[in-house]
Amino acid sequence: MFANRADAGRRLANRLAAAKNEYPADAPLVVLGLPRGGVPVAFEIAKVLDAPLDVIVVRKIGVPHQPELAMGAIGEGDVRVVNGQVVRRARVDDAQFARVEARERKELARRAERYRAHRDRVPLVGRTALIVDDGVATGSTARAACEVVRAEGATRVILAAPVGPPSVISSLRQVADDVIVLESPEAFFAIGEFYDDFTPTPDEEVVRLLRLQ
């Protein structure tokens, strides 16, 4: 469906640009990419919308024996989201959850320091925060990101992604003022299946794109 993240970003940017006049004039837009894969998508969107680009650093808390399955997420500012249903189904106890969370908090701190070493965060107070990822799977990371930007004073929160399953997109409308996706297929197994090239985005690429914008 998408050649790569840049292709997905350009297509998503076209959809968002068509609705740009609907954004509140008194709440300037800022585009926030979810590292790492969401940043190349967000970079293309920020160019088209002529908006500042920043990152919103959150980390997925994966099930110990199945790390790709999110049982929660954490974000800057001590934001913590727990998917109780996944925790119960995976039979993860408090000690197991705490161990994974502690490891992910270290990684969150490392990434935040790396990405923000040469630039200040874009203030979100009174702004429209457009959170961008390369796709939505369980929604835990996106949910945490929405809560982070609201805690930082964003007036309006929009979540945008190229693809995501219908049930998850519907649930995310509870935490975002608007959720925009290009495709929402019922048959959804993994984000990568919708990309020809889903090579992991390295930290160096995230830093490079932030410096270019």
Image (cartoon, rainbow, N blue to C red):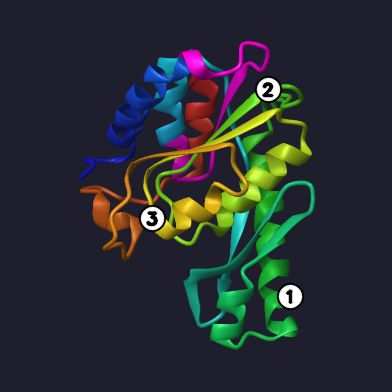
Gap in Å between the C-alphas at discs 3 and 1? 30 Å
What type is the residue that disc 3 sits on? Pro
Q: Residues within 10 Å of mark 1 (few under 14, many from 20)?
A: few
Q: Is residue 134 above or below residue 12?
A: below
What type is the residue that disc 1 sits on? Ala
Residue located at (69% from left, 77% from top): 97
Residue 39 within the segment the image draws in magenta: yes
Numbered disc 3: secondary structure: helix
Gap in Å between the C-alphas at discs 2 and 1? 34 Å
| Residue 132 image position (x, y, % from top left) | 49, 38
| Relative depth, front residue between 64 and 203 | 64
Q: Are marks 2 and 3 in contact (CB under 8 Å)?
A: no
Q: Is residue 150 above or below residue 44?
A: below
The numbered dot on residue 98 is 1
Q: Which residue is mark 3?
A: 166
Residue located at (32% from left, 33% from top): 6
| Residue 142 image position (x, y, % from top left) | 56, 50
Of the 4 image quadrants, the one containing the N terminus is: top left
Residue 210 can be seen in this image: yes
Numbered disc 2: secondary structure: loop
| Residue 83 image position (x, y, % from top left) | 61, 69
Residue located at (27% from left, 33% from top): 7
Q: Residues within 10 Å of mark 2 (few under 14, many from 20)?
A: many
What type is the residue that disc 2 sits on? Arg
Q: Which residue is mark 2?
A: 127
| Relative depth, front residue between 16 and 62 | 16
Badge nearest the viewer, 3 or 1: 3
**Where does the magenta region start and end?**
21-40
**Earlier-in-chain disc, 2 versus 3:** 2
**Earlier-in-chain disc, 2 versus 1:** 1
